[in-house]
Amino acid sequence: MRLSTTSYLVLGMVALRGPSTPYDLKRATSRSVGYFWNFPHTQLYSEPERLAASGMLAVDLEDSGRRRKTYSLTPEGRAALQEWLAAPTPEHFEMRDVAELKLFFNEAGAPDDDVPKLAQEQIRQHEERIAVYEDMVSRHGDEDWARPRMITLELGLEMEHAALRFWTALAAGTIDDLRRERDERDPR
Amino acid sequence: MRLSTTSYLVLGMVALRGPSTPYDLKRATSRSVGYFWNFPHTQLYSEPERLAASGMLAVDLEDSGRRRKTYSLTPEGRAALQEWLAAPTPEHFEMRDVAELKLFFNEAGAPDDDVPKLAQEQIRQHEERIAVYEDMVSRHGDEDWARPRMITLELGLEMEHAALRFWTALAAGTIDDLRRERDERDPR
DNA sequence: CCTCGCACCATACGAAACGTACGGTGCGTT
DNA sequence: AACGCACCGTACGTTTCGTATGGTGCGAGG
């Protein structure tokens, strides 16, 4: 039985948090691991169902009031998770960046030059996202339980800064400097 | 009629290259814009079909030998592309990074520590990808037609270097230095 | 000149993911 | 008590995915 990466995300989340409802998972993923693995929240209702059917999760149904299912990890689920964590990771990260696409086609030499506006938009967005990350770090960075999670966010920050540098340089017409600085920093 | 981003990718590609077959597009996208917008190659057969049905592309069917459809841009298609390029871009880029997911769950304190192996793998991968990018730049960087395309690749390079720095620091246990250096470089 | 094999190219199709839209729940307010 | 709104869950039509398969034609080797 082949599990999708999103399945493992669910398993991992339940492993971290203990018994959880889909909504719990939604809240817990939305501004953390969700940044590194995009998916619609409806998956958090269908995936656990499937995982329960295959014995990876146990489901506890609350019968009063709001219909609500609490999932918890079974030994099989934990084993599957461990196995996945220990397995090789041949995949390179995947990106989907509309702005970059637009740049690609614009740079072809469009009649109107939409690049400056695009760059400004992107700069704003990345600055905003950086602020979100920084806020999370500053609020939780000193709590022990959160530290490992925060380390994960460092990659997000590096990426955001990379993007920010790129669009800033593009707006300023100093892409060549960008390259030069990078060569200095990480000489090949 | 709402077009998906992948549709615009097709339109843009045909705009750049002129009349193209799906396979042409596959080759042209696979190591350029495909890095910024991941999709399965079968889309390059179905999307143009749909775009042709809605008048964005014109299809020229070659009837001898290998069945082969050549698509070219119609005025409607060009208009749609321009409109899209000029429109605001509210989307933040999306990522899907299995390695980062694994790190997130591993850092929870797994019984076995798979992080060092994971980091080594990632370092290798990102170095490899950087080499691919650099190779492209060095082979085409001085040709006029390619320059705009190469600028687009700079973001890819920044991202790869960001990831490489992260995983290297993680492997070396110097994540704090990473943060410090970033603060120096891009003071808030 | 034939044919064999392999890389190239195209697509069918079942399964999975997506995302919107809707409907129930319950708490706080008036 | 009734209302309203934010919270929570899911149904369902649509799109995407990705594998698996089957043609096509060129070049190598006989």
Image (cartoon, coloured by chain):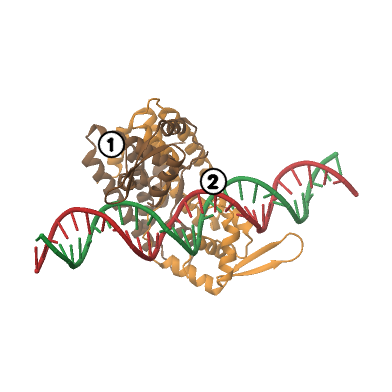
Chain colours: A orange, B brown, C green, D red
**Residue bearing mark 2:** A138
| Position of B181 relative to A44 (above/below) | above
Q: Amino acid at mark 2?
A: Ser
Identity of the residue drawn at 45% across and 28% down? A117
Residue furthest to the bottom in view is: A75
Output the chain of dot 1: A
Q: Position of residue B37 (x, y in %)?
A: 41, 45
* Residue A97 in sight in this render: no
Query: Relative to A150, is B17 on the left or the right?
Result: left
Q: Quadrant of residue B17?
A: top left
Output the chain of dot 2: A
Query: Relative to A110, is A51 on the left or the right?
Result: right
Is disc 1 surrounded by few (<14), some (14 to 19) or many (20+) residues within 10 Å?
Answer: few
Query: Relative to A67, is A56 on the left or the right?
Result: left
Is disc 2 surrounded by few (<14), some (14 to 19) or many (20+) residues within 10 Å?
Answer: few
| Position of A112 relative to B155 (above/below) | above
Q: Nearer the viewer, residue A157 or B181?
A: A157
**Callout 1–callout 2 Cβ contact below 8 Å:** no
Q: Label for residue A62? A: none
Identity of the residue drawn at 44% across and 32% down? B76
Identity of the residue drawn at 53% across and 70% down? A77
**Residue bearing mark 1:** A180
| N-terminal label among 1 and 2 | 2
Question: How many marks are shown on the rendered structure?
Answer: 2
Q: Nearer the viewer, residue C9 or A13?
A: C9
Q: Position of residue B89 (x, y in %)?
A: 49, 35
Q: Quadrant of residue B135?
A: top left
Circle 1: element type: helix
